Image (spheres, rainbow, N blue to C red):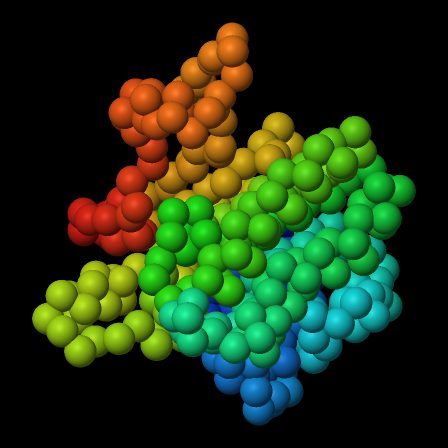
Amino acid sequence: MGKLDNKVAIVTGSGRGIGRDIALLFAREGAKVVINDLGSGLDGSNNDTKVADEVVQEIKAFGGDAVANYDSVADFDAANHIVQTALDAFGRLDIVVNNAGIARDRMIFKMSEEEWDAVIAVHLKGTFNVTRAAAPIFKVQKSGRFINFTSTSGLIGNIGQANYAAAKLGIAGLTKVTALDMARYNVTANAVSPFAWSRMIGSIPTETESEKARVEKIKQMSPAHIAPLVAFLSSEESSDVTGQIFGVRGKEILVFSQPRPVRSVYNSEGWSIDSINAIKGSLKQSFTPLEVSADVFPYEPLV
């Protein structure tokens, strides 16, 4: 007996990488899976339907059940068709994993409007689109699981990824409100920030020795490390877990903090530029350092 027997799942972007490993584990745990993937390149171009078809064939080869879907999550109507694919093929829907994504990295002073819009459309709007399509079904049946993918690029910060970081931090907010809106219907929503070598981060520069060392460190972390947590968050065992942000770094599972006030000051006469400047030093003790993800996670992955 699998932990996901009789469940139906949609995994977006599941033709490769992290999404593929999630879909394979879901199927091995008894779920029927919709493999959604355009088969596009890292930048979202050059679609290839065989990418999703090959994962379906792989699942069926070990006795699992899956169907392919090639719709774009960035399109609202297409997202509804992704959900309808699950209903048509399997008669129900229990789990949505919003994993699909593209990358268009560029420094903020060089980023084009098209590069911004494309990344926001797939990551943030795409997560909303599929969530919006599935939420009414979950509401009626009073059960369901949303697992959305965020990133330390948004939670902490990374250079040259303003579009990606904005989308991923937006997904964290979307996940929290989805959890709040759906809680009364026994539906959970959680976010996962993955640390793993995939084509999404395969474009990291390797020109210096430090960059090469960083990439080698990331390569130790397999997409397969991510799948068990996602499977847990999709199972009945996680019914009391919602609105959380998790990370997986090798064999280490993390729980991220979420923004809360850390310090306050009060002036009965109101504030001016000078009076704020006068107490700036006490506030600075609570400022968040200007760091990138590698600064916060400098230690070797626990693999």
Q: Tell me residue 65's x, y (percent).
A: 67, 68
Q: Is residue 22 left or right of residue 236?
A: left
Q: Is residue 6 left or right of residue 54?
A: right
Which residue is at 67% across, 64% downward?
126
Q: Tell me residue 205's x, y (percent).
A: 26, 75
The residue closer to the viewer here, 56 or 209, is 209
- Locate residue 167: give its quadrant: bottom right
Which residue is at 71% across, 33% downward?
180
Q: Is residue 175 left or right of residue 186?
A: left
- Locate residue 281: give its quadrant: top left
Residue 117's place in the image compared with 136, above or below, is below
Q: Residue furthest top?
A: 268
Can residue 16 be seen in this snapshot? no
The residue closer to the viewer here, 259 or 179, is 259
Residue 63's place in the image compared with 262, above or below, is below
Q: Tell me residue 147's x, y (percent).
A: 60, 49
- Marks counted in the figure total 0
Residue 55's place in the image compared with 153, above or below, is below
Residue 151's place in the image compared with 234, above or below, is below
Q: Tell me residue 154's x, y (percent).
A: 45, 52
Q: Residue furthest right?
A: 140
Which residue is at 51% across, 8% downward?
268
- Locate residue 90: give its quadrant: bottom right
Q: Residue furthest left?
A: 209
Can residue 190 be seen in this snapshot? yes
Which residue is at 33% across, 32% downward?
287
